[in-house]
């Protein structure tokens, strides 16, 4: 079995040569005593100089509020944390904060910088929504259920090319999408049918990242954790769905089944497997 490390969100600040980490926190299961709360932390690129920027306190001192996703607006230097108390917007140094959306079940969010919008998954309505940075104006982007309980588990907006991509999970088949997971995209400027890119994902797909012309995403099963990628550049993808459907080839960037980095020995000398809950793709010439 995989042990999910309590790091939910990870992003890199290029100018500061550091990472911002959203830590979901931890409570001791046997006593329900809070060991450390949900927090935002800063790390140097080498993993040193761990600094707590802010802590999100729970109403009862028994368990952390939890966290699901983290996004950043470089233009406004806002951090957006999807937590068990909603989406919390903070300044980069966390000197100010406000809860802009109260939904506490948001598994994924991303920032459309030029539009100044936060895109997020709403599992309760099986949809993708967007809101301004104050959370005052929300708007339906796309209903992705398509007659099933399909919901987005990861989102990324490619504003330059006019696409939104999402990973999805469902407990039933949906137009070629398996009961485990699939990868879709759709045009941002219309209501055209979603384009299924990859199906048959035998894992829970999660976070998405776009770097220049490449698309990466996270997959977790009960025994392995992987970062996958489309084995085609985004610019090479067909503009419309293909008939008959042909899944886009994929590749594995890193897998826990192929690397010792994901094995640790606990204080009882038991070997545990770690799972990736967030990742960042860094390229010197582009980041």
Image (cartoon, helix red, strand yellow):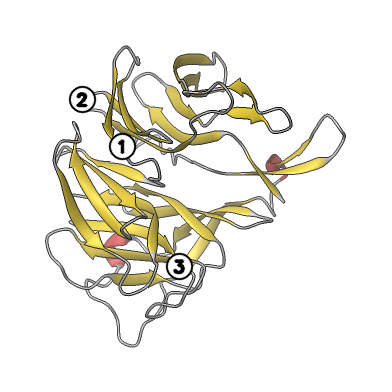
User: Would residue 161 be visible to someone looking at this image?
Assistant: no
Residues at badges 3 and 2 in contact (C-beta under 8 Å)? no
Q: Residue at x 38, y 61 (%)?
A: 151
Q: Is residue 115 above or below residue 254?
A: above
Say which quarter of the image contains residue 198.
bottom left
- Percent x, y for residue 64? 53, 28
Helix, strand or loop at label 2? It is loop
Residues at badges 1 and 3 in contact (C-beta under 8 Å)? no
Q: Is residue 162 above or below residue 62?
A: below
Of the pair 88 and 275, the residue shown nearer to us: 88
How far is disc 3 from disc 2 in space, using C-alphas? 35 Å
How far is disc 1 from disc 3 in space, using C-alphas? 25 Å
Residue 170, which numbered label?
A: 3
Of the pair 287 and 181, the residue shown nearer to us: 181
Residue 102, which numbered label?
A: 1
Within-10-Å neighbours for mark 2: few <14, some 14–19, many 20+: few
- Percent x, y for residue 187? 19, 63
**Residue located farthest toward the right when viewing the structure as drawn:** 269
Task: Indicate which disc, 3 or 2, sits on the residue closer to the N terminus.
Answer: 2
Within-10-Å neighbours for mark 3: few <14, some 14–19, many 20+: some
């Amino acid at each position: 079995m995989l042990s999910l490390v309590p790091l939910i969100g990870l992003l890199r600040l290029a100018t500061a040569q550091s990472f911002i980490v959203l830590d979901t926190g931890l409570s001791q299961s046997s006593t329900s005593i809070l060991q450390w709360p949900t927090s935002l932390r800063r790390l140097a690129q080498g993993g040193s100089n761990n600094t707590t920027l802010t802590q999100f306190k729970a109403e009862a001192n028994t368990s952390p509020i939890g966290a699901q996703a983290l996004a950043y607006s470089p233009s406004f230097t806002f951090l957006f944390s999807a937590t068990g108390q909603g989406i919390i917007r903070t300044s980069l140094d966390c000197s100010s904060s406000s809860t802009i959306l109260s939904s506490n079940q948001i598994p994924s969010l991303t920032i459309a910088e030029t539009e100044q919008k936060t895109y997020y998954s709403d599992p309760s309505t099986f949809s993708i929504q967007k809101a301004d940075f104050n959370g005052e104006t929300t708007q339906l982007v796309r209903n992705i259920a398509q007659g099933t309980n399909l919901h987005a588990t990861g989102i990324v907006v490619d504003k330059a090319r006019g696409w939104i991509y999402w990973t999805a999970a469902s407990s039933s088949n949906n137009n070629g999408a398996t009961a485990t997971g699939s990868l879709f995209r759709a045009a941002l400027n219309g209501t055209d049918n979603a384009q299924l890119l990859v199906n048959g994902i035998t894992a829970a797909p999660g976070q998405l990242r776009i770097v220049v012309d490449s698309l990466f995403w996270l997959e977790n099963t009960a025994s392995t954790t992987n970062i996958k990628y489309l084995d085609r550049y985004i610019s090479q993808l067909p503009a419309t769905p293909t008939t008959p459907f042909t899944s886009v080839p994929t590749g594995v960037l890193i897998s826990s089944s192929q690397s010792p980095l994901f094995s640790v020995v606990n204080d009882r000398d038991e070997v545990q497997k770690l799972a990736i809950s967030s990742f960042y793709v860094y390229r010197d010439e582009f980041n």
